[in-house]
Image (cartoon, rainbow, N blue to C red):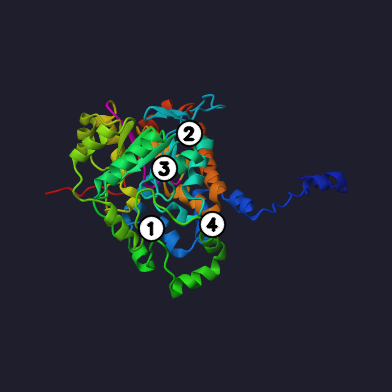
């Protein structure tokens, strides 16, 4: 027979201990960011606080947006295989990449028109990266100058992403400026002979500078703080283009040149004194040729799905490329990374480094510099937690044995 539960008069002191209240956070920005536990949470905040055209430029990709969806799905389709009974009270997330250190296995990717997303722009990203001890990459289409990024991140690692434009002298001049400013790595981007068809931008009439229409006026009423920031801060300026106006696609078509070739790569190599990395590689054969030419690194990327839709998934391509050229050159990866577990899976499959683009911009739109700090902290916590749960103490201990890439899309057999 069960004995009845003995009850007692509640102890007032114990009740008060249980009812201790957390002091409310009065700073709205800090409160929003502290409540964000994932990059998806930051994306939701960014969407609420940013005009639709600017948010869609960041969030969207090309055509039917198949490439970015597949890239993210590929990271979801990962099965981890943890070890057991290993002391992981401390883990080391540091690495070396392209001749220098990084405190974490990810850095900030180049993004264009960044101050249009939030007025602190690249300065916030560079300063946050410097504080975290990770590299920051400035885009040719960035809205902060090379020298401005150096001022925001004076002692950290700054990289420059280069488009070879129709007017070669403009590109060559940017290379020389980046070298003078102490940037240590140049990312020669090769996947943009022309602009991809970014349909969200066309439907929104997205242009630089923003043009007022009936829909943008309505959007303004819901987000007056964004327009106040935009109208009361410095005019948008681009690192390379001296002319503005028109749609993003038209600007990109002006900047890009479909005639770029290996001769241009050789020319840039002769001008650049630091590490030369080729970004936008999408097959094993090109990886091999670049390694044979002696580039310092390659970035497997389909430009975040923003160029050729239905392009190869970089994470799926990674193990084949590492097998082919990993002993000869460093392989990095971007596209689709939204969680620290994605970073860990990439390192386990052989990547030396990873780059985050949208994840950084969601944080920027959600809260400026503090939002970028929050992005880095979220990803850092996820990297550390995933490593501890896998029971590895350093990035060097991660191997392909820790990851299975589950197969959702398999090539159809040819007859």
Q: Identify the residue at image location x=47%, y=27%.
A: 394
Q: Main secondary structure of the magenta part?
A: loop
Specify whether residue 291 is in view. yes
The reply to whether the magenta stretch includes residue 330 is yes
Residue 236 position by quadrant: bottom left
Q: Position of residue 194 (x, y in %)?
A: 25, 54
The reply to whether the magenta stretch includes residue 39 is no
View extreme (left): residue: 415
Above/below status of 35 relative to 274? below
Cα–Cα span, label 2 and label 3: 14 Å
Which region is colored magenta? Answer: 328-338
Q: Identify the residue at image location x=21%, y=31%.
A: 293
Q: In the rendered structure, are the residues bearing label 4 and label 1 in contact, judged by CB atoms less than 8 Å apart?
A: no
Q: Which residue is mark 4?
A: 45
Q: Nearer the viewer, residue 9 or 292?
A: 292
**Of label 1 and label 3, which has the lower sequence position?**
1
């Amino acid at each position: 027979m069960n004995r009845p539960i003995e009850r007692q008069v509640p102890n007032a002191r114990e009740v008060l201990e249980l009812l201790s209240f957390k002091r409310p956070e009065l700073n709205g920005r800090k409160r929003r960011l502290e409540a964000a536990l994932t990059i998806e949470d930051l994306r939701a905040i960014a969407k609420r606080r940013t005009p639709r055209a600017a948010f869609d430029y960041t969030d969207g990709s090309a055509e039917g947006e198949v490439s970015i969806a597949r890239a993210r799905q590929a990271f979801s389709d990962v099965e981890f295989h943890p070890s057991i009974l290993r002391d992981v009270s401390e883990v080391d997330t540091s690495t070396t990449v392209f001749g220098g250190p990084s405190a974490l296995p990810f850095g900030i990717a180049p993004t264009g028109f960044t101050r249009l997303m939030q007025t602190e722009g690249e300065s916030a990203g560079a300063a946050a990266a410097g504080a975290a001890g990770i590299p920051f990459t400035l885009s040719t289409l960035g809205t902060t100058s090379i020298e401005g990024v150096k001022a925001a991140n004076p002692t950290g690692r700054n990289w420059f992403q280069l488009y070879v434009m129709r007017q070669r002298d403009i590109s060559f001049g940017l290379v020389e400026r980046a070298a003078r400013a102490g940037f240590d790595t140049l990312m020669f981007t090769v996947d943009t002979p022309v602009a991809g068809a970014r349909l969200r931008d066309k439907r929104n009439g997205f242009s630089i500078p923003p043009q007022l229409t009936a829909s943008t006026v309505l959007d303004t009423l819901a987000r007056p703080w964004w327009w106040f920031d935009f109208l009361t801060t410095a005019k948008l300026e681009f690192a390379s283009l001296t002319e503005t106006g028109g749609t993003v696609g038209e600007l990109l078509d002006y900047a890009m040149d479909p005639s770029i070739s290996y001769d241009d790569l050789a020319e840039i190599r002769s001008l650049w004194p630091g590490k030369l990395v080729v970004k936008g590689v999408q097959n094993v054969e090109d990886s091999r040729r670049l390694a044979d030419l002696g580039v310092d690194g390659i970035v497997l990327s389909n430009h975040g799905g923003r160029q050729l839709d239905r392009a190869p998934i970089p994470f799926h391509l990674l193990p084949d490329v590492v097998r082919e050229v990993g002993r000869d050159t460093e392989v990095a990866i971007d596209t689709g990374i939204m969680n620290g577990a994605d970073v860990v899976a990439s390192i386990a499959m052989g990547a030396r480094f990873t780059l985050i683009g949208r994840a950084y911009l969601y944080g920027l739109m959600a809260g400026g510099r503090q939002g970028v700090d929050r992005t880095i902290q979220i990803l850092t916590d996820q990297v550390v937690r995933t490593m501890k749960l896998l029971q590895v103490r350093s990035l060097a201990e991660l191997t392909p044995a820790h990851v299975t890439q589950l197969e959702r899309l398999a090539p159809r057999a040819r007859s």
